[in-house]
Image (cartoon, rainbow, N blue to C red):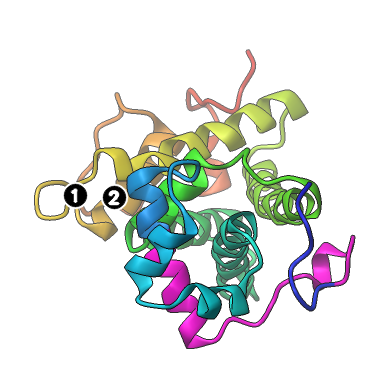
Amino acid sequence: MGGSPRGAAVGDPMRARPTYDEKLLQILRDASEVFALKGYHRASVRDISAATGVSLAGLYYYFRSKEELLFLIQDHCFGTLLDRLEQDLSGVLEPEDRLRIFVRNHLLFFLNNRDEMKVLSHEATVLTGDFRAMIAEKKRRYSDTLHEILAEIRPDDPAVLRASTFALFGMMNWIYTWHRPGRDLDEEGLINETLHLFLHGFARCRDPGEDTAVSEDSLEGMPSIWRTT
């Protein structure tokens, strides 16, 4: 079973985030690269030591096991996403603007942290015990925020809103598998196209400079993924 991070209150996910100093952040970046390349189960702590240039004793100052290292990577990523999102959403009331902020926050973070995104996607079920519970709580907070935004844009059957929430995550979470800088859309283009596809669908053409945020009135009478009939 997974343990608890050092200094954390066992069973209290809201108080569980450790302090990340610059040395630990660099270790997490290098470890993410190793896990992304070799996979969590094939990678060893010695591989992490070689990649970071930090001795085994030095690594074990920051974590007690490979599982705790994976927890720290995930905790830092989801914690950063939540902190930035809550800050950017503060004071923003229009649901369409809130959706744009959410998509922008998500895509920019993962376009600039591709190894971490691969680790989060491929090693999502590895953690156990308290580690798993604490990450699950952050994931719930994050997905609930998107669900609530979509419910404001188009109130609908809970099953439809749940499907729409995770459909949008599906669009965003696998971008690292195909997106190539310099060949594909740049960051702003990708954000705009993701919003356009999700809100309007592929068949509705648009001017490349068109604002993809939509008003509540403009959705009326328009074929929409939000509707069940």
Nearer the observer, 222 or 92: 92
Q: Is residue 161 magenta?
A: no
Q: Which residue is located at x 30 percent, y 39 percent?
A: 177
Up/down of 123 relative to 201, above or below: below
The quarter of the displayed image where residue 109 is located = bottom left
Start and end of the magenta stretch? 9-31
* Residue 130 visible in rendering: yes
Label 1 – label 2 distance at C-alpha: 5 Å
Question: What mark, if any, has residue 185 been given in the picture?
Answer: 1
Left or right: where does residue 200 sit relative to residue 63?
A: left
Q: Amino acid at mark 2?
A: Leu
- Asked if residue 110 shows in the view, the reply is no
Measuring from the top left, give residue 119's x and y in whole percent: 46, 49
Which type of secondary structure does the marked residue at label 1 adopt?
Answer: loop
151 lies left or right of 80: right
**Quadrant in which residue 108 is drawn:** bottom left
- Label annotation for residue 190: 2
The answer to whether the residue labelled 1 contacts the one labelled 2, judged by CB atoms less than 8 Å apart, is: yes
Residue furthest to the left: 183
The amino acid type found where label 1 is placed reads Leu
Report x, y in % for residue 13. 81, 63
Question: What residue lies at 74% left-to-right and 68% top-to-bottom?
Answer: 5
